[in-house]
Image: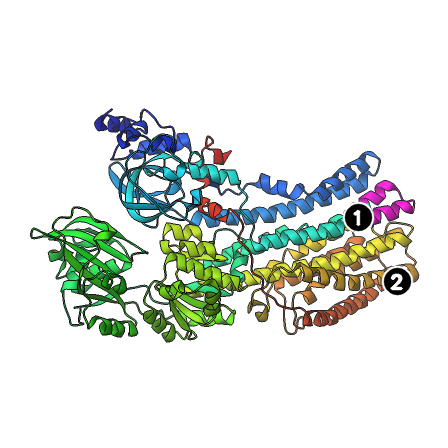
Amino acid sequence: MGRAGTQASVREGTPRVTEPLAVTDASAMPAARVLARTGTSDDGLSAGEAERRLARLGPNAVRTHRARLGPVLWRQVRSPLLALLAVTAAASFFLGERTDALIIGAILAVSVGLSTVNEYRAERAVQALHEQLRHRVVVVRDGRPGPVDVVELVPGDIVELRLGQVVPADVRLLSATALECDESVLTGEPVPSPKTPGPVPPGAALAELSGCALMGTVVRAGAGRGVVVATGAHTEFGKIALGLGERVPETEFQVGLRRFSMLLVRVAAALTAMIFVVNVALDKPMLDALLFSLAIAVGISPQLLPAVVSTSLAAGSRRLAHRKVLVKRLVCIEDLGDMEVLFTDKTGTLTEGRITFTGSLGPEGGASGDPLLLGLVCTEATVEGGHVAGGNPLDTALWTSPASAERREEAGRYRRLATLPFDHERRLVSVLAEHAGERLIITKGAPEAVLARCARTPAGAGPVLDKEFAAGHRVIAVATRPAPDLDRLDPADERDLDPRGFLVFLDPPKDTARDALRRLAGLGVTVKVITGDNPAVAARVCAELGLPPGDALTGTDLDGMDDERLAEAIDTATVFARVTPEQKARVVRAQRRSGVDVAFLGDGVNDALALHAADVGVSVDSGTDVAKDAADVVLLEKDLRVLADGVTEGRRIFANTMKYVLMGTSSNFGNMFSAAGASAFLAFLPMLPSQILLNNLLYDSSQLAIPTDTVDEERLARPARWDLGLIRRFMLFFGPISSIFDFATFGVMLAVFHAGPTLFHTGWFVESLATQTLVIFVIRTRRVPFTRSRPSVPLLAAALGAVAAGAVLPFTPLARILGFQPLPADFFFVLAWLVIAYLALIEIGKRWFFRHVPEVPRARPRRTGHRVHRRAARFSARSKILHPRHPTSR
């Protein structure tokens, strides 16, 4: 079928083939045959046909972001402890203990429901965040190019590929200009793969498919155009991403949570086994003993820890979103709080990012219009009708400057025959142009790169550059040479050039940057600048913003250092200038090896390697696709103040999470240890299984307000990390203090009130709930509670409400059902003194304990597969475009 026939069938909505075509098959076919097989043409699909294919084949996605209640509920009920307790309760129901079994079942249901609701809300928060991130690609439809959401691509679409772009699907190339793709995410090969439109022999390996660009790979140089042959799970990248599963590698925070939970599971297992054995040895009913020991295990388990953490992270994500910070995953908020060193680029972060053209100078420094004219011709910007429609900031500044108005018409008389695009290795862009019958190469770029390719260097060029750099100006050099016999360009042609002069630009320091740097310093974050600009320019900007002075290292300096010397030099360096992408990543890795957590902020294709190497990758919404994909956090505004907000929020959330953790390991462990001890000498169970679960439910419910709590300033001034040793010591130190007051309560109930089983159960229920709940006001701060550190109103109300509920329960109609009876008035007088004495002793112990706690930062490893998972996040479908046939929606 010819082009006309193919296009007609597309317009009519009845193409011959719409199924995905394996990229290995497409690579061996001529381009014309691939167009025919996919039912398309150079003019692309019609909008209607694209919609029909999307409905039939599903979105171009390997992930979904949908908050689903079912999986969240399953995560809550799959706990072996809960399952065993539910089975045992069911058995007791059929053996006659129906009331207790129903109470236990109801409490378990409420507890699971509470956790489910809170975690589901967090899932909704993740979905809301995802909805704000869009990934677009230029697609030709109805004969016109335009932006399309990447997940709405279908086989047959014609796509444009540009520098820095993540290839959006498996694409058979139709044309390519110096195109190279980084395929390391698929093949592991660090060297970019050159691409050409020609077919390859059948059966070629993945790394040899030079005629195709593969989904998930990155355009490292050049440009191209191609036809989509496969999308989503049918692509090579999709198969790998799906093979890794939906589970993304854990962050350090998640690892800490898991290890802490396992610590309590081991403690619970030991206590459960001991209590069961002791009770059976004392001839207590085996079923009662089993229920009691399981209830204790559930009581010490951090059931609501996921809900508390999820609530904290979801609330934090909403606060950060209001401050224009989007996190890819909620746990990335914790990663932000761990930041100790920040590497940031200069343009738009420390400077305004509004580059203005200020002058055109000759090779010796005098005013000259030639560099301006040649710079307008040598451009990658998209120019329509004499106006720039898109391009890099320097080209845009040049074309929109008042000085260029007089030369635009003259520049339009040059006919560009070929373009050698800019890349970060050469740091140049060249065009082959024709004017008045003569052909010439025009090259512009970094002055040292251009002058190194010139046949001669003017004597005055060095002083001119030094003067401009010292003033904080950005300088672009322009050079030319005649090329009468050339029809195309490659890097070898950039030689024997004649220097024509310099273009000077200004990007002034940002007014808000000084305050942002001061805030980050107050948070203990060291800021270092890593840039492709000249070191003198970067140093001048740093000095104007008050950034502490330090050494300035260039890429050449780094090449002369081994890793050991770099590790020594990096501590005193503030500026890293004229560095390649690989050097940026090397600097980040060297800093991480010093034992600190490193963040990297970048928005260009040359930043991707460093973003992957950092503990926390930060990009901006206006950045390149590859930068946003490599990042963990995306800023909607390129402002360091926004990043400082993120650091503060991350540390606040971690501090509040640790409050719950330390409470759970002290009061819960103490209460359960008391139960174990009491069961050894009492003739009856110290508390009924249903009462233990109810106690735990009331206590945990009050702790859901912890995410709202305030955090002391000194806790925000430095990062904090998981330390199981600290948690274990805290549990063993404060747990017995809690048990002392439990045993005091036992003595009072037996000796003073001569309590029988029901009164004993009631008294200890009220006392244990009061002590383990109110201790939050001491644990939540290292300051003096209430006077120097006040809790949030919601936390105060929740804690007092839980204690009040426990105290009132014995006087309600539910008392008899729950196994309670009214307490004598004198008990509450004794309870008040017990609580005061307990909190006072905890305060004294807290001061002694934390005086001996070391603050030692620890580096954390990156885990295998994080790059594929990060990249897969861009190919994530939203619920509104999911289709039942697509694998991701099943």
Query: Gap in Å between the C-alphas at discs 1 and 2?
Result: 26 Å
Q: Is residue 277 magenta?
A: yes
**Looking at this view, is 427 or 174 the one in front?**
427
Secondary structure, mark 2, is helix
Q: Badge 1 is on which residue?
A: 272
Residue, x 62% and y 51% (percent of image)? 307
Quadrant of residue 830 within the rendered picture: bottom right
Secondary structure, mark 1, is helix
**Looking at this view, is 819 or 285 the one in front?**
285
What is the chief secondary structure element of the magenta stretch? helix
Place of residue 747 in the rendered image (x, y in percent of width and height, measured from the top left): 89, 61
Query: With respect to residue 67, does 612 lie above or below?
Result: below
**Looking at this view, is 434 or 796 the one in front?**
434
Residue 822 visible: no
Determine the residue located farthest toward the left in the rendered image: 436
Residue, x 51% and y 63% (percent of image)? 339
Query: With respect to residue 438, does 571 lie above or below?
Result: below
Q: Are marks 1 and 2 in contact (CB under 8 Å)?
A: no
Place of residue 129 in the rendered image (x, y in percent of width and height, measured from the top left): 47, 50
Q: Which residues are magenta?
A: 273-291
Using residue 259 as the reference point, say whether residue 87 is left or right of it.
Answer: right
Residue, x 81% and y 34% (percent of image)? 94
Using residue 88 as the reference point, say whether residue 62 is left or right of it.
Answer: left
Q: Badge 2 is on which residue?
A: 748
Using residue 335 as the reference point, say whether residue 44 is left or right of it.
Answer: left
Place of residue 473 in the rendered image (x, y in percent of width and height, measured from the top left): 28, 70
Residue 295 visible: yes
The coloring applied to the image is: rainbow
The label nearer to you, 1 versus 2, is 1
Kind of residue at badge 2: Val
Kind of residue at badge 1: Thr
